[in-house]
């Protein structure tokens, strides 16, 4: 057996195999990047190497984590982008100064070694996704270029196994994604009807409001919700106990005043003082008569009768019975069931430009699958506070078909003018953004 040392070619081949083994056994992309720029340095003797993946420097020789804004990193990223636009992107070759712009040449002289070998990293279909920038003082030999190219092939295979290329970074898929993006952007300019949703209620049209004619306590409701009534029918009865007592007291006070007046009138023929008090007593009689008439008038108002035919529209009679009310307080509505309108409460944040006779579609909560068409009649100029505590504009609309029953609630879709689809989709987010930034 010969004891002669192995040839230098054998040592080079052994180092080559060891580097390839380390690359394929790396369990993370960081470990592989360290192997690429550091473990191959003894084999090729370069001053430094930089690994570029998808235009970004991922590792540099002797550096734990390359700074993204370092001058050397910026130079390598700019130079690699220029190299990939030339024929050198397809093969491992020595970098020529003519392939870089003047700024990159100046940075090359200041930041890197004079002899540079660029080894592109390619996927299985030959598409370049990165490269290795190897710089040293000695010129690169053809044998070394071949070894670097073989190692770059192994590095590419190992890198893709640890960190597959995203679909959108592949040139072929870029075009496949670009076409849908262009179509999507084009769709954003399609004109559509701008529309908003708002709560709505079916209310009587030109209904007669029945209000409390006096301050008092309701004794009973003579009708039930949505009951048909005729003109003259009793609707509401107030408690008249106090009013009857007041009317009786007023009547007795009037009788006393009239008796005192008659007595003074008889004594006036003989008594001068009695004659002087006649005018005063006559005024008292008129005052007591007025008080009696007022008490009787209030007593006559304790019963409210219907002034026309219709249906009684209110929520619940039980919640009114025994409740004190003030004069003018709304008790119920008398409405024609065939004459209804749609009342919409449009939130101030959803206010859009609306034209007269704008189309409206109502979806009732009780029957959400059956739409009811309507046309806009009126839009309030001022917002009002709703029972829910929100500010909203009132919209009134008329139905174009068979109207629903009075009192039903639902959601109304109010259609405005034509706007691009982008405005329709992003109107509210843009409004919130504008309010946030103060524009």
Image: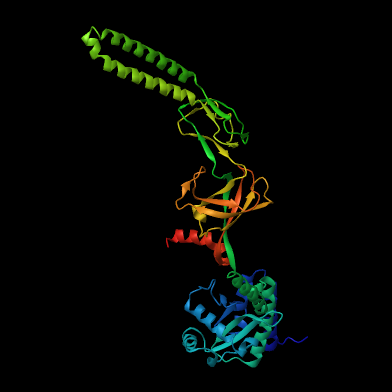
| Residue toward you, 183 or 318 | 318
The percent position of residue 50, horizontal first and vertical second, equals 57, 79
- Report the residue at 64% width, 89% height from top: 145
User: Quadrant location of residue 272?
Assistant: top left
Residue 75 visible in rendering: yes
The percent position of residue 365, horizontal first and vertical second, equals 64, 46
| Residue toward you, 411 or 110 | 411
User: Quadrant location of residue 268?
Assistant: top left
Residue 18 visible in rendering: no
Question: Which quadrant of the rendered structure holds the C terminus?
Answer: bottom left
Q: Pick out the residue farthest to the right.
A: 1
| Residue toward you, 193 or 334 | 334
| Residue toward you, 418 or 46 | 418
Give the answer, above or below, for where 59 lies relative to 261: below
Question: Which quadrant of the rendered structure holds the N terminus?
Answer: bottom right
98 on left or right of 36: left
357 on left or right of 144: left
195 on left or right of 282: right
The percent position of residue 373, horizontal first and vertical second, equals 63, 54
Give the answer, above or below, for where 146 lies relative to 272: below
- Report the residue at 61% width, 81% height from top: 131
Q: Pick out the residue farthest to the front.
A: 269
- Report the residue at 50% width, 62% height from top: 430
Report the coloring of the rendering: rainbow
The percent position of residue 226, horizontal first and vertical second, equals 62, 36
């Amino acid at each position: 057996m010969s004891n002669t040392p192995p040839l230098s070619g054998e040592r080079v081949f052994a180092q080559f195999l060891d580097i390839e083994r380390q690359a394929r056994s790396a369990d993370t992309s960081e470990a592989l990047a360290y192997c690429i720029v550091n473990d191959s340095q003894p084999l090729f003797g370069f001053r430094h190497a930089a690994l570029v993946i998808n235009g970004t420097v991922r590792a540099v020789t002797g550096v734990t984590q390359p700074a993204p804004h370092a001058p050397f990193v910026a130079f390598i990223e700019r130079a690699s982008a220029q190299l990939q636009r030339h024929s050198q992107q397809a093969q491992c070759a020595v970098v020529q100064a003519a392939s870089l712009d003047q700024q990159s040449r100046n940075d090359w002289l200041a930041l890197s070694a004079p002899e540079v070998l660029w080894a592109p990293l390619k996927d299985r279909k030959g598409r370049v996704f990165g490269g290795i920038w190897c710089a040293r003082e000695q010129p690169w030999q053809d044998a070394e270029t071949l070894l670097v190219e073989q190692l770059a092939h192994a590095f590419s295979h190992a890198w893709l196994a640890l960190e597959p290329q995203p679909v959108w970074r592949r040139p072929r898929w870029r075009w496949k994604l670009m076409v849908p993006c262009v179509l999507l952007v084009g769709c954003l300019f399609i004109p559509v009807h701008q529309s908003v949703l708002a709560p709505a209620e079916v209310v009587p049209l030109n209904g007669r409001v029945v209000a409390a004619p006096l301050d008092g306590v309701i004794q009973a409701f003579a009708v039930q919700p949505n009951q048909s009534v005729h003109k003259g029918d009793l609707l509401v009865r107030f408690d008249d106990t106090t009013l009857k007592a007041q009317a009786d007291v007023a009547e007795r006070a009037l009788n006393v005043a009239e008796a005192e007046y008659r007595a003074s009138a008889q004594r006036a023929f003989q008594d001068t003082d009695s004659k002087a008090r006649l005018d005063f007593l006559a005024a008292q009689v008129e005052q007591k008569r007025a008080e009696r008439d007022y008490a009787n008038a209030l007593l006559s108002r304790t019963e409210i009768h219907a002034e026309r035919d219709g249906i009684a529209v209110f929520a619940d009679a039980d919640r009114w019975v025994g409740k004190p009310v003030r004069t003018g307080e709304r008790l119920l509505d008398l409405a024609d069931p065939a004459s209804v309108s749609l009342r919409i409460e449009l939130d101030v944040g959803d206010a859009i430009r609306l034209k007269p006779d704008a189309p409206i579609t109502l979806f009732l909560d009780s029957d959400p699958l059956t739409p009811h068409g309507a046309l806009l009649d009126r839009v309030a100029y001022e917002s009002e506070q709703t029972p829910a505590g929100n500010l909203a504009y009132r919209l009134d609309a008329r139905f174009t078909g068979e109207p629903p029953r009075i009192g039903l609630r639902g959601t109304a879709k109010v259609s405005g003018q034509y706007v691009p689809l982008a405005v329709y989709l992003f109107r509210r987010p843009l409004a919130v953004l504008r309010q946030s930034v103060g524009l």
